[in-house]
Image: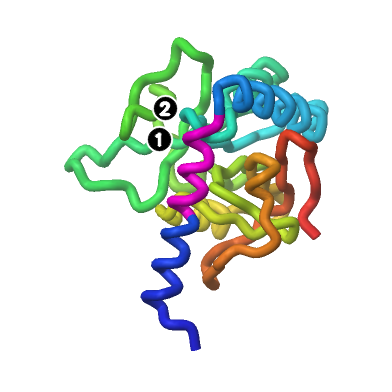
Amino acid sequence: MVDPAEFHAAKQALRAALRQRRDVRSEDERADADARRTAAVLDFLGDVSGLTVASYLSVVPEPDTTEIVSALHAGGARVLLPVLTPHADGSRREAPTWAVYTGPAGMRSGLWGIPEPSSPPLGPHALADVDVIITSALAATASGQRLGVGGGWFDRVLAGAPASCVSMTLVSADELLETLPCEPWDLRVDVIATEAGVQRAT
């Protein structure tokens, strides 16, 4: 039987190693990978007019979503972004709420300096009719397992998503691993996107 403390320590060590790998990538390497990944994602999604897409808004050195979000918005999709700002009483949110992206002018600096929409939060049923969810990850496998940053937010998001929703995660090609340490609540995604292309989980 795996010792829970050892398992957790191994998971944290892997997260640290993956973060370090991201940190040492050059700006040129990152920009090239981001451009190719973005093109692959947009090609995969095709005509997004009328779709509702929930996405995270990346910060360096995460795989870029800013161009994806802009293109989806311009293409007629209803784009939802997380609002992480604490509750009015200062307590931390257990899961992000969501708000509609209306363009760069409608953004503000949120928790940890992460940009978020200034439009009103939509409430607990914001993702009831979402078509696509783009999640963050530090690594993924071909079977759709993902290693998140450790907050568990996107696992809760995926757990509450409609069955018809397509879930996608963005990683670099060298972050597509054979195996990952996973726990029962670590939900799989349907699609993995890297700079090498987009693939459905097997």
Measure the alpha-carbon separation of dots 2 and 1.
6 Å
Relative to 86, does residue 65 appear above or below in the rendering? above
Q: Earlier in the sequence, mark 2 or mark 1?
A: 1
Q: Position of residue 160 (x, y in %)?
A: 55, 56
In the image, what residue occupies the spot 47% across and 44% down? 19
Q: Name above or below for residue 86 compared with residue 5.
A: above
Q: Is residue 157 above or below residue 97?
A: below
In this rendering, the answer to whether 61 lies above or below 75 is below
Q: Is residue 176 left or right of residue 196?
A: left
Q: Provide the residue designation for mark 1.
A: 83
- Marks 1 and 2: in contact by CB < 8 Å? yes
Stretch of the chain drawn in magenta: 15-25
Horizontally, residue 119 falls left or right of residue 196, namely left
* Viewer-proximal residue among 189 and 98: 189
Query: Which quadrant of the figure contains the C terminus?
Result: bottom right
Residue 24 in sight? yes
**Residue at x-position 62% and y-position 40%:** 134
Could you say which is closer to the camera, residue 132 or residue 112? 112
Inspect the image, locate mark 2, and give the three-letter code of the amino acid beneath it.
Glu
Q: Is residue 24 magenta?
A: yes
Question: Dot 2 lies on which element?
Answer: strand
Q: Which amino acid type is shown beneath numbered disc 1?
A: Val
How crowded pointer 2 is (Cα within 10 Å; few <14, some 14-19, many 20+) is rated as: many
**Residue 103 pos. (x, y %):** 53, 15
Q: Which residue is mark 2?
A: 116
Per the rendering, the mark at residue 192 is: none
Q: Magenta-highlighted stretch: main secondary structure?
A: helix
Residue at screen point 40% across, 67% down:
9
Residue 96 x, y percent position in the rendering = 41, 44
Residue farthest left in this picture: 89
